[in-house]
Image: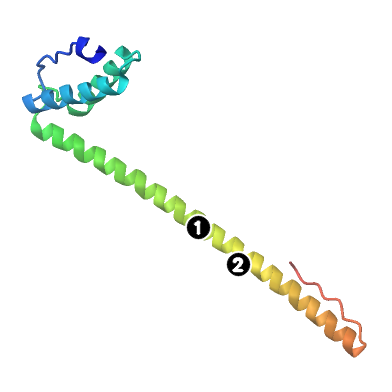
Amino acid sequence: DTESSLTLDVMPVVGLSTAQLAALEKQLRLRIAELVGREMVFEMAQTAQDFLRKYNVDPKKSIHDEMVEQQQRQQLELEIASRENAKLEREEERKLKEEEKAKMKVELHEERQRRKQLYRMRGKTPRKKNIIS
């Protein structure tokens, strides 16, 4: 049994609570189970790094500093989302204008064809007009 021959020890570090250490260990054990039979050292290191980036707190920072940073990150994410929404709205508006323009062009063409047909039926030739299309 390969899984039982693997040893995993999570050492306490400054900046992580006991609950966070337990969560990291659980996450690593789940990752081990997923990777049994394959090379996993890099994957395990990556999983631990990702966890630490997300949860490890600089002991020199106050709770207030952490809150301010989190608010700044959230504000930045909101600004990015807002820009994306505005961009999507502009694109949608552009598409609607293009569709309306194409519809008007088709309607104009159909009106020209209808008038030509009417003139032919009456035996008259249509007058040429300068119409910008």
Q: Label 1 neighbourhood size at 10 Å, few (<14), some (14-19), many (20+)?
A: few
Q: Residue furthest bottom?
A: 122
Q: Is residue 21 left or right of residue 72?
A: left
Query: Residue 121 location in percent, x, y?
Result: 88, 87
Query: Residue 41 location in percent, x, y?
Result: 30, 12
Of 65 and 3, nearer the camera is: 3
Q: Is residue 62 left or right of residue 49?
A: left
Q: CA distance from mark 1 to mark 2?
A: 12 Å
The type of residue carrying mark 1 is Glu
Image quarter of residue 70: top left
Task: Identify residue for label 1.
Answer: 92
Task: Tell me whether circle 1 and circle 2 mark residues in contact (CB < 8 Å).
Answer: no
Image point (30%, 17%), residue name: 36
**Circle 2 sits in a helix, a strand or a loop, which is it?**
helix
Image point (16%, 22%), residue name: 25
Of 49 and 40, nearer the camera is: 40
Task: Identify residue for label 2.
Answer: 100
Q: Residue furthest left?
A: 18
Image point (14%, 27%), residue name: 23
The image shows residue 29, relative to residue 95, as above or below, that is: above
**Circle 1 sits in a helix, a strand or a loop, which is it?**
helix
